[in-house]
Image (cartoon, grey):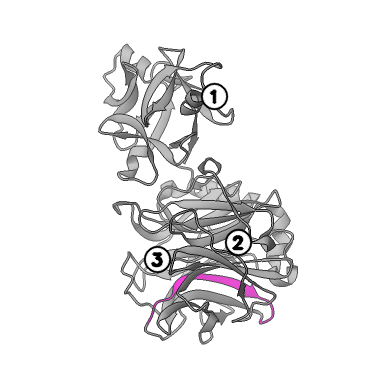
Amino acid sequence: MKRRSLFAAAGAGATAAVLGAEAAHAATYAGYAMAYFTESPSMTAADYNLHLAVSADGLNWTPLNQNAPVATPTQGSTGLRDPFILRKQDGTFAVIATDLKGTDWTYQSQYLHVWDSIDLRTFTGYRLLKVHSLATHAWAPEAIWDASRGQYAVVYSAVVGGRNVLMVNYTSDFVTASAPQTFFDPGYDAIDGNFVTVSGVNYMYFKNNTNSTLLGTRSSTLNPGSFSIYTSAITPGRGVEAPQIVKSNTADVWYMWGDTWSPNGRFFCWQTTSLSSGSWTLLNDRAYTQPLNSKHLGITAITAAELSALTARYGTPAWSRIKSYNYPDRYIRHQNSVGRIDAYPFDPYQDQLWTLVPGLADASGVSFRSVNYPDRYLRHVNYAMTLAVNDGTTLFAGDATFYKASGWADSSWTSFRSYNYPDRYLRHSNYVLRIDPVTSSSAASLQQDATFKIGY
């Protein structure tokens, strides 16, 4: 789709000549911030404003501000897509984004939304940046410092010669920009450029918009026309876009995120230990969790102090999502008062949101209170899990109370033991939730059915 990308921190191995202040700080990075907007399959979660999430490992994300926006565009279309966070040479941030509210792909804006920020906790100087005067759009912007010019290169997608190509303007202040020129044209529709620089080599990944696959290019310079494709097509087996590459802060590993078509999208994530090889391995969904309803992510590395300050400023969600171990694309939800696991994304998206409160029968346990039906809890009836109004009885309290235990299939995950049937654990069977006996001698498949991950 129409998306932006971001300049991920390239880590200590990147050349200081290209990365400037970023390389000097790379060794101190301890987390990540993600920018995104939101949509859901029926568009009930559509929100075309700036959202933020944070992560310690770059894989599992915590939405900030209860997944509500932290900044709102007020000019142009009054909505954004494809937000991108740039850490500038002075260590402060610029946020740029596509000027488009909704999904009217015929909308033509010559501008980008821009904010300044010293810490991603406040956003100032909101403005529009004009990048061209053509009868076309300016989609999925990313900025990267071009040391040879002493300016930032702003790269985005626009239609030239009947197809999308990647265009570039140069700026020092994100207030005015040079005349646009073609940056990369593979001869077919191309969007969503994403940059990272390692050991003097500049890598740019983009979306082949004719078949919805990702491709990698590289160049020894950042000059327009200098990038050559060096990978085969990358796909998770369905259409993908919006590549986003970020380096682990703790290991010689790179992650590449990709988004699927809006609004039914979800993220996929690959990893590699060698960008130069162009070989990527698709990760299992157990390894990562995207922010709820997030679209077109942009990631930048942040320090431990910045991570702590962002969490303190915006808070963490008051709700949780609970992921299945052996079907990690599925989350616990209620549907027609039945407890089950379903594949993300779905609507009503609130059905997967739970407040884990002190157990109704024992405060050392937990009970699952529905966010969109806050007078209702998951309980078992004849061993089947159902969503029901708390009737205040001792039986209800016992049926709705569980103890958290080490996951049967993975001790870093969680299993939930029934309060009033302590030999039974919450599990799914044919995607429907129930409680059944589970022991150390139980079949591995049953232990996996009874293992979950609490996250956001």
User: How far across and down, in percent of the image, does residue 294 sit?
Assistant: 43, 53
Q: Residue at x 43, y 69 (%)?
A: 210
* In front: label 2 or label 3: 2
x, y percent for residue 211: 44, 66
Of labels 2 and 1, earlier in sequence is: 2
Q: Residue at x 59, y 59 (%)?
A: 245
Residue for badge 1: 408
Q: Sequence order check: which comes first, mark 1 or mark 3?
A: 3
In this figure, which residue is indicated by the disc labeled 2? 8
User: Within 10 angstroms of label 1, few (less than 14), some, or many (20 or more) residues?
Assistant: many
Distance from the alpha carbon under mark 1 to that under mark 3: 43 Å
Q: Residue at x 33, y 41 (%)?
A: 350
In the rendered image, residue 285 lying in the magenta stretch gets the answer: no
Label 1: which secondary element: loop
The residue type indicated by label 2 comes to: Ala
The amino acid type, in three-letter code, at marker 1 is Trp
Q: Quadrant of the N terminus?
A: bottom left
Residue with the mark numbered 3: 80
Determine the secondary structure under disc 2. loop
Measured along the vertical axis of the image, is residue 54 above or below residue 150? above
Give the magenta part as a residue range. 136-149
* x and y percentages locating residue 407 in the rendered image: 54, 26
Instruction: Look at the picture and state if 453 lies above or below 282.
Output: above
Of 72 and 378, which appears nearest the observer? 378
Gap in Å between the C-alphas at discs 2 and 3?
20 Å
Instruction: Name the amino acid type tagged 3.
Output: Leu
Q: Residue 31's mark?
A: none
